[in-house]
Amino acid sequence: MEVKLFGAAKEVTGSCYSIATGNEKILIDCGMFQGSKDNSRLNYEDFAFNPRQYDALILTHAHLDHSGRIPQLVKNGFRGRIYCTDATRELAYIILMDSANIAKQDSENENKRRAKEGLPVRKPIYNDIDVRAAMKLFKVIEYGEDIKITKNITARFYDAGHILGAASIQLDVREGSKTTLLAFSGDIGQSEAVLVKNTEPIKDADYTFIESTYGDRLHPPIEDRKTEFLRIINETYKRGGKLMIPSFAVERAQEILYYLNQFKQEKLMPDIDVYLDSPMAQKATEVFTKYPNYFNDQVRKVMKKDKDVFDFPGLKITQNVEQSKAINPITKPIIIIAGNGMCSAGRIKHHIRNNIENPKNTLLFVGYQAEGTLGYWIKKREKLIRLLGTQVQVNSKLEAIDGFSAHADYEELLEWLKNFTRKPKKVFICHGELEQSEAFLKRVEKEGMKAYIPSRGEALKL
């Protein structure tokens, strides 16, 4: 059997595993590369494999760095089934349609530059038609259900506790009389997740592939996260400023709304309007309300008294661009939640451009900032940034609450590994910048397990 990583190897984004045995080939995830321009350009390159040769794809969850190139894969000849949970299918559709729209806009802007330089026109990597074609291949399965993916490969999904519908995968691979168990963590959630249930362990594997996004750090306790959030809200209000929150549309936006609902009910924050200025987050929130079975016990308990835990007095939903623009002249303190989480696209870029020079305002990061993104450079305290064709000075107060992350820290990742009833023959450490992966490798080895960090495109013979 051969396993190859075509992304998320010594890097966070572009998750894509190839598992090949005999005449059978399957993929786990087919994600988009994000971050620097060099990374983003990888999405326009041909796949390093022939999509037509693959029998199936298993999608761990809907995030763009795991699902983002699926329409491109289908466009290039893939015709197998795409297996995922029901919530993942619905969220993936929202995310991929938004991605197609961004690809269209990016290509239009790029082609203006190319026209001036006499370069050929560049087409979007895919469009909405390609997304709809891909969605026809999706097949929903449930956690704990054994699914025959091919004649010799059976898969079982486990709740990864990361975002709504996210899964870790156990593969039973048969080669003649030999059976090999593989475990793929997907993205593992925190043990104190705000909305979803805790991670469900996989108990047995010969080889395991584990993410390491936060392989070198620990998250603060959940109460510290809430206290910090309240402090930032109240301090910004006292300064008379706007609080801008770049947010991922799936999970993070809903967590923030859930907290704000709590703060409002408990009268812990001032009477301040909250603008959810993200069409994708609005659609994703509708999916969340549709699948309460994925929520943890605490959220379901709250829902007995408050059916809509994502709505509260003072929440304003922007329906169109005009309503989004109408936020700009507001001078009183407000909270703006807008996508995307790394400030590399979406309406948050306009809010930053219009407000970042005012020292009364606050820009609050609540998620991972991939290297090379606008969010990464602002968080690195760059004083001058170029945004939407304009150079602006960063005068607003910068805050970050890393504990909001939907990714496990290194202790939680180790706990996931310790759940195996026998130590895997080898642990492959993926989905992390090299520094994080190397730090986590040392911790895994201290637990008496053999570990290795694969490179992109490297063939692993198991």
Image (tube, rainbow, N blue to C red):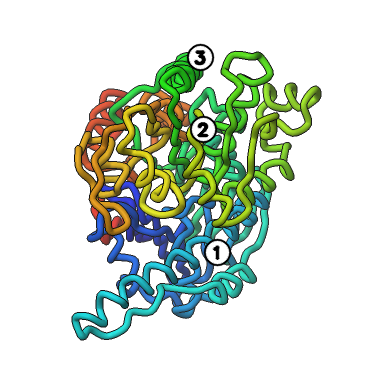
Query: Picture quarter containing residue 208?
Result: top left
Q: Secondary structure at mark 2?
A: strand
Q: Are marks 2 and 3 in contact (CB under 8 Å)?
A: no
Residue 228 image offset from top left, x and y in percent: 44, 18
Other-residue count near label 3 (Cα within 10 Å), few / some / many at <14 / 14–19 / ≥20: few
Q: Amino acid at mark 2?
A: Ile
Residue sitting nearer the eye, 245 or 449: 245
Horizontal relation, residue 80 to residue 398: left or right? right
Q: Earlier in the sequence, mark 2 or mark 3?
A: 3
Q: Earlier in the sequence, mark 2 or mark 1?
A: 1
Residue sitting nearer the eye, 154 or 276: 276
Distance (Cα) linking label 2 and label 1: 27 Å
Q: Residue at x 72, y 37 (%)?
A: 292
Determine which of the numbered discs, if any, sits on residue 335 in the image: 2
Q: Amino acid at mark 1?
A: Met
Residue sitting nearer the eye, 282 or 42: 282
Q: Is residue 379 visible?
A: yes
Q: Amino acid at mark 3?
A: Glu
Distance (Cα) linking label 2 and label 3: 21 Å
Other-residue count near label 2 (Cα within 10 Å), few / some / many at <14 / 14–19 / ≥20: many
Horizontal relation, residue 113 to residue 139: left or right? left
Residue under pointer 1: 97
Q: Residue at x 26, y 74 (%)?
A: 113
Residue sitting nearer the eye, 403 or 373: 373
Q: Secondary structure at mark 1?
A: helix
Residue under pointer 3: 223
